[in-house]
């Protein structure tokens, strides 16, 4: 496999301090050690792959999942747990320029439907995922950001059919949102959850429905044969009529070759405090259970979890090594202390990093890979994959069965991914982009 980061990024070290790993065990599953056949094979055991497997198995399809490590090892089991709107970066104006008004409406409908799908899955399988938060709250980093939020209330009503709530600067402390911001906008769609508990429960449901999941089974090559598409691994192979590539930011440049240069993994780092006492919460004035993020380009995302641990994440890591991870975590800690000064002495015993996945065209892709009949993928959720990856995995389950999707399939994500400039060396453009973002955030 050809990957654009050093091996360190894809190993166990970056997630060694992950809090989620202490909250939920992943069942042991065997590695593939034989040659087998099935109707649909899936590469990757994250939200996309497991959701696709569940919906295929429930439709009576013989489906096999091959996971390089274990279910949820990548971003699906180490993200911030924000089940929210998003997945792409286009504004309404940009969407309409690309696909018109109807295309813009389709995408926004899919965003809402993606959150609803996760909610329905949690209810249907009675999953305990430590749910909290009434939607998602954006915090204004600058006064002008709050001024812009006031124009977004009407847009949220038209776009999502919900009433967004503004919190003026003077009311933030009373709302339990005291962290130096200049106002807030809450959209009552979405909720926080424990992503490891969610993906673990989803995988168990997929197996109950009949899916087979193999751990520690890296797919090293894909080939077309007279009998179908063959996935080669170290100790066996799977031949299937259809294949779904569900590796997202942990993808390889050559599995399949078409992916080369078409996705950009970039790092996000998270720290989690010990449980905070009521007096500590009161001292800072942050007592809300809302999941929140700020208006920076290189944003921070944070939420007080049900056990009063504070989760705090940052975007912007560019390198993959032990020392680079340490620097990223140190930056997260420094930003945490600046935002929540009353907690500067509160320990953060848990910290980790993982990769989100960006597209050159700033929107996900879900569909059949051009020029490779029977090979499908969905990827590039721009750091908001809990809901959208679950949704598009379910959508792929219809596509690989040659069914008209039973859910909204937006035009904007039917367009194949474009290549980044510089190909395998595309990470070289990121320092310049991040420097511009940092300057814009001032």
Image (tube, rainbow, N blue to C red):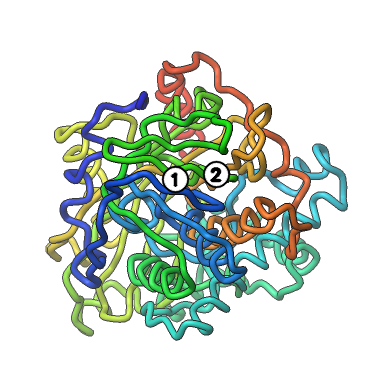
Give the percent coordinates (x, y) of residue 339. 32, 57
Relative to 402, say whether 261 is above or below: above
Q: Would you say 419 lies left or right of 314 here?
A: right
Give the percent coordinates (x, y) of residue 121. 53, 76
Q: Would you say 57 lies left or right of 108 here?
A: left
Residue that lies at the very extreme toward the top in this rendered image: 422
Label 2 element class: strand
Relative to 427, say whether 237 is above or below: below
Label 1 element class: strand
Between the residue at mark 1 and the residue at mark 2, the CA separation in whole angstroms equals 8 Å
Which label sits on residue 243?
2
Q: Quadrant of residue 249?
A: top left
Q: Would you say 388 lies left or right of 110 here?
A: left
Label pair 1/2, CB-CB below 8 angstroms: yes
Q: Quadrant of residue 377?
A: top right
Instruction: Tell me which residue sits at (37%, 56%) in the image.
Output: 79
Q: Which residue does the numbered mark 1 point to in the structure image? A: 43
Residue that lies at the very extreme toward the right in this rendered image: 101
Instruction: Tell me which residue sits at (45%, 60%) in the image.
Output: 181
Q: Residues within 10 Å of mark 1 (few under 14, many from 20)?
A: many
Give the percent coordinates (x, y) of residue 316. 37, 38
Which label sits on residue 77?
none
Relative to 26, say whether 188 is above or below: below
């Amino acid at each position: 496999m050809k990957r654009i980061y050093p091996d360190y990024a894809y190993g166990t070290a970056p997630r060694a301090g992950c809090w989620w790993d202490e909250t939920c065990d992943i069942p042991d599953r065997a590695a593939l050690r034989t040659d087998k056949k099935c109707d649909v094979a899936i590469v990757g055991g994250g939200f996309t792959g497991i959701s696709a497997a569940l919906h295929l198995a429930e439709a009576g399809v013989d489906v096999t999942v091959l996971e390089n490590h274990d279910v949820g090892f990548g971003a699906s089991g180490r993200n911030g747990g924000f089940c929210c709107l998003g997945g792409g970066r286009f504004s309404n104006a940009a969407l309409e320029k690309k696909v018109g008004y109807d295309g813009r409406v389709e995408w926004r409908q899919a965003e809402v439907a993606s959150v609803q799908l996760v909610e329905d899955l949690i209810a249907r399988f009675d999953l305990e995922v430590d749910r909290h938060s009434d939607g998602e709250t954006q915090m204004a980093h600058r006064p002008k950001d709050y001024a812009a939020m006031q124009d977004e209330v009407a847009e949220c009503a038209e776009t999502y059919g919900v009433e967004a709530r503004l919190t003026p600067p003077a009311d933030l402390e009373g709302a339990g949102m005291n962290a130096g911001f200049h106002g807030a906008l809450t959209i009552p769609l979405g909720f926080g959850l424990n992503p490891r508990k969610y993906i673990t429960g989803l995988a168990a449901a997929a197996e109950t429905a009949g899916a087979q999941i193999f751990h520690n089974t890296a797919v090293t090559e894909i080939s077309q044969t007279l009998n179908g598409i063959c996935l080669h691994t170290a100790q066996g192979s799977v031949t299937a009529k259809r294949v779904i590539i569900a590796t997202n930011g942990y993808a390889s440049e050559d599995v399949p070759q078409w992916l080369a240069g078409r996705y950009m993994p970039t790092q996000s780092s998270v720290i989690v405090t010990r449980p905070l006492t009521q007096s500590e919460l009161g001292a800072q004035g942050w007592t809300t259970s809302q999941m929140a993020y700020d208006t920076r380009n290189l944003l921070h995302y944070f939420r007080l979890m049900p056990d009063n641990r504070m989760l705090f994440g940052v975007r912007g890591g560019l390198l993959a090594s032990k020392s680079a991870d340490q620097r990223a975590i140190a930056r997260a800690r420094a930003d945490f202390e600046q935002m929540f000064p009353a907690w500067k002495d509160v320990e953060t015993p848990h910290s980790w990093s993982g990769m989100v996945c960006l597209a050159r065209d700033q929107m996900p892709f879900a569909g059949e890979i051009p020029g490779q009949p029977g090979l499908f993928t969905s990827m590039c959720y721009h750091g908001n994959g809990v809901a959208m990856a679950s949704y598009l995995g379910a959508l792929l389950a219809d596509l690989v069965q040659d069914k008209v999707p039973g859910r909204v399939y937006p035009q904007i994500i039917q367009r194949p991914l474009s290549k980044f400039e510089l190909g395998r060396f595309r990470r070289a453009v990121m320092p310049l982009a991040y420097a511009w973002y940092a300057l814009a955030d001032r």
